[in-house]
Image (spheres, rainbow, N blue to C red):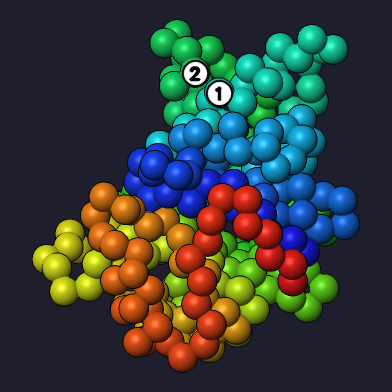
Amino acid sequence: MRLTVLGCAGSFPGPESACSAYLIEADGFRLLIDFGSGALSALQRYSDMRRVDAILLSHLHCDHMLDACTYVVVRRYDPAGPLPPVPVYAPMGAAERIAAAYSTEGEPVDDVYTFYGLQPGTFPIGPLTITVDRVNHPVETYGVRIEHNGRVLAYSSDTAPCEALLRLAAGADLFLCEASYQDGLPNPPDLHLTGGEAGEAATKADVGKLLLTHLVPAWASEASIVEAATAAYAGPVEVVRPGARYDL
């Protein structure tokens, strides 16, 4: 299983990265997890934009799904002919949300996507075993656990501290975890993690490596986020970058 980071900026595109988008590859199958603002550009840089086998949207905030709207053009109007519909696993209302953002008339996108509503549980997507659960964010949001050949990648999506996050990350080889806020500030509650909270979650879940993502350079320095995370977690910590690849 391989993880390629397409975008990792938190909440809005950063000066050096698109918003959240992560490509998971296993046995020739390609799953795109989240498809945030600007991520379609990165998808073309690091992969073949036509070869996406499935998409999972953790939630319907723009920084995690907006380029699924732009991607309609890629699949509907390819000069060689329309590409087959792609399965999309997302919270309920995703079809209407994407259609409304793509066209003011709310033009249906069921020729491009086949939608499956997420709910807590475990299910296959291609060769991957996927487990999702609701995490602590203002809208319906799912953290994700991905298993393949005995290896585990956990993804926090957007969340404040919660028990579901720890269950999803338990024993994961890689824990891709958001760290949007700086410790010690009066941050809004029930929205995002600080670097220290990401490190605490990694320790409690006993993960192999902590990959920090969804940092917001306009809100907190990377150095302060990493310092807080490493103070709370003794294992290896890395801030992800666009184009970074991790093999499990």
Q: Secondary structure at mark 2?
A: helix
Pick the quarter of the image with the C terminus.
bottom right
**Residue 205 or residue 109, whichever sits in front:** 205
| Lateral position of residue 234 relative to residue 1, left or right | left
In the image, which is nearer the foreground, mark 2 or mark 1?
Answer: 1
| Lateral position of residue 107 relative to residue 87, left or right | left
Q: Secondary structure at mark 1?
A: helix
Q: Is residue 90 above or below residue 84?
A: below
Q: What is the number of callouts on the image? A: 2
Location of mark 2 (residue): 102
Q: Where residue 124 sits: x, y (%)?
A: 75, 58
Label located before the other in sequence (2 or 1): 1
Q: Where residue 236 sits: x, y (%)?
A: 53, 82
Residue 70, numbered circle: 1
Disc 1 residue type (three-letter): Thr
**Residue 164 or residue 201, whichever sits in front:** 201
Residue sticking out furthest to the left: 186
Disc 2 residue type (three-letter): Tyr
